[in-house]
Image: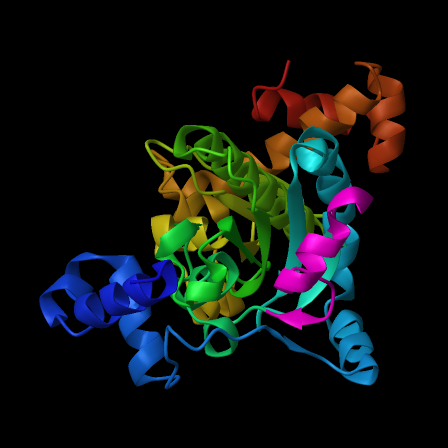
């Protein structure tokens, strides 16, 4: 029995056991490929390639994602490019928008479809790093024979989804290799590199979406997800990453209504009626700081007299 036939038989046997699919994300993906996408593991399929016009349109739609990912792609490629790895940045549909790879490996990766314009969704090529990460909305590693198609079992792929400023999956970052000498331990290092890079890209997208806002990082605890808030000058939350939304139970409706960061963070106030005085005290301290403690200059910035400023400072206990 050939390797391809043995792999196909294993996929069929495993995917037809509902209990196995319930306990294994890989087998769940295999079952999804068979039942939803009507794919057969023994019938190898290369990724679909978009026509030039469609590809350019996909890049236009994802222009922000491409721009905010460029530095991360270059940085990772410097580390793994000479090790026979290929990097792909895709959109939410699995379309490879950007690629990094060594020229000496181009022929192999081109034949496998690891190339710009290729569609690496599950519907296109079955279980794979990109398609399965997008389908499950989580980081995944698909190692050799965990791929659905027998034609892809030489590949090792590790992928992390990328979320936009509203917490929605907007793309994915993938490292793939077909080298025989890559083991699971080595690949686990690449997995962490991909996840870290995806988070940095998410941070870039979030900051770009809220220019001028104050960005707060929430305590992460045991979570490794990026938990950020964008807050305006009045302490109203403008946006939150998915991790922050989950942690603080925020959704689009609550954010649109305008919720103070201090309320969302459950910051204790012993005197709820003192908020106005607190705001005035904070304003005085900021102006005094800008004036380097010079009362005359601070009063001038506020448009009040020195005497009035002294009275306010005494009343609000500002020293």
Quadrant (top left/top right/bottom left/bottom right) for the N terminus: bottom left
Give the image quarter of residue 76.
Answer: top right
- Quick check: 281 above or below 116? above
Residue 234 visible, this orientation = no
The residue sitting at 23% across, 72% down in the picture is: 12
* x and y percentages locating residue 38 in the rendered image: 37, 86
Q: Which of 266 and 168 lies nearest the eye of the viewer?
A: 168
Instruction: Examine the structure image and report whether residue 114 is included in the region drawn in magenta.
Output: yes
Q: How is the image coloured?
A: rainbow
Boundaries of the magenta span: 100-119
Q: Which of 312 and 148 lies nearest the eye of the viewer?
A: 148
Q: Residue furthest front?
A: 1
* x and y percentages locating residue 36 in the rendered image: 34, 84
Q: Which of 12 and 206 lies nearest the eye of the viewer?
A: 12
Residue 106 visible, this orientation = yes
The residue sitting at 36% across, 58% down in the picture is: 3
- Quick check: 269 above or below 253? above
The residue sitting at 62% across, 45% down in the picture is: 203
* x and y percentages locating residue 101 in the rendered image: 74, 46
Q: Which of 228 and 127 lies nearest the eye of the viewer?
A: 127
Give the image quarter of residue 5.
Answer: bottom left
Instruction: Examine the structure image and report whether residue 70 is included in the region drawn in magenta.
Output: no
Q: Is residue 206 left or right of residue 131?
A: right
Quadrant (top left/top right/bottom left/bottom right) for the C terminus: top right
The residue sitting at 27% across, 73% down in the picture is: 31
Please give the count of numbered marks on the rendered protein.
0
Q: Is residue 303 left or right of residue 244?
A: right
* x and y percentages locating residue 42 in the rendered image: 38, 74
Q: Residue furthest left?
A: 19
């Amino acid at each position: 029995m050939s390797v391809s036939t043995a792999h196909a038989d294993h996929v069929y046997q495993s995917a037809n056991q509902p209990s196995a699919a319930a306990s294994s994300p890989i087998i769940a993906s295999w079952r999804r490929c068979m039942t939803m996408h009507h794919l057969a593991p023994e019938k190898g399929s290369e990724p679909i390639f978009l026509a030039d016009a469609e590809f350019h349109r996909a890049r236009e739609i994802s222009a922000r994602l491409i721009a905010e990912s460029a530095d991360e792609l270059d940085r990772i490629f410097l580390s793994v490019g000479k090790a026979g790895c290929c990097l792909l940045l895709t959109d939410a549909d699995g379309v490879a928008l950007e690629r990094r790879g060594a020229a000496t490996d181009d022929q192999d990766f081109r034949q496998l479809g690891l190339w710009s314009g290729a569609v690496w969704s599950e519907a296109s090529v079955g279980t794979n790093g990109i398609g399965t990460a997008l389908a499950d909305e989580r980081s995944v590693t698909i190692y050799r024979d965990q791929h659905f198609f027998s034609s892809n079992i030489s590949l090792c792929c590790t992928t992390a989804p990328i979320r936009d400023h509203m917490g929605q999956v907007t793309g994915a970052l993938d490292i793939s290799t077909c080298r025989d000498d890559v083991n699971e331990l080595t690949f686990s290092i690449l997995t962490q590199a991909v996840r870290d890079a995806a988070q940095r890209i998410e941070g870039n997208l979030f900051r770009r979406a809220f220019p001028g806002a104050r960005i707060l990082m929430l305590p992460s605890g045991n979570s490794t997800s990026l938990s950020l808030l964008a807050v305006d000058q009045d302490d109203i939350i403008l946006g939150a990453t998915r991790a922050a939304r989950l942690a603080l139970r925020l959704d689009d409706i609550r954010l649109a209504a305008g919720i103070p960061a201090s309320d969302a963070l459950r910051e204790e106030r012993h005197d709820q009626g003192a908020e106005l005085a607190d705001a005035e005290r904070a304003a005085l301290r900021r102006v005094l700081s800008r004036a380097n403690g010079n009362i005359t200059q601070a009063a001038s910035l506020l448009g009040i007299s020195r005497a009035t400023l002294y009275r306010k400072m005494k009343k609000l206990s500002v020293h």
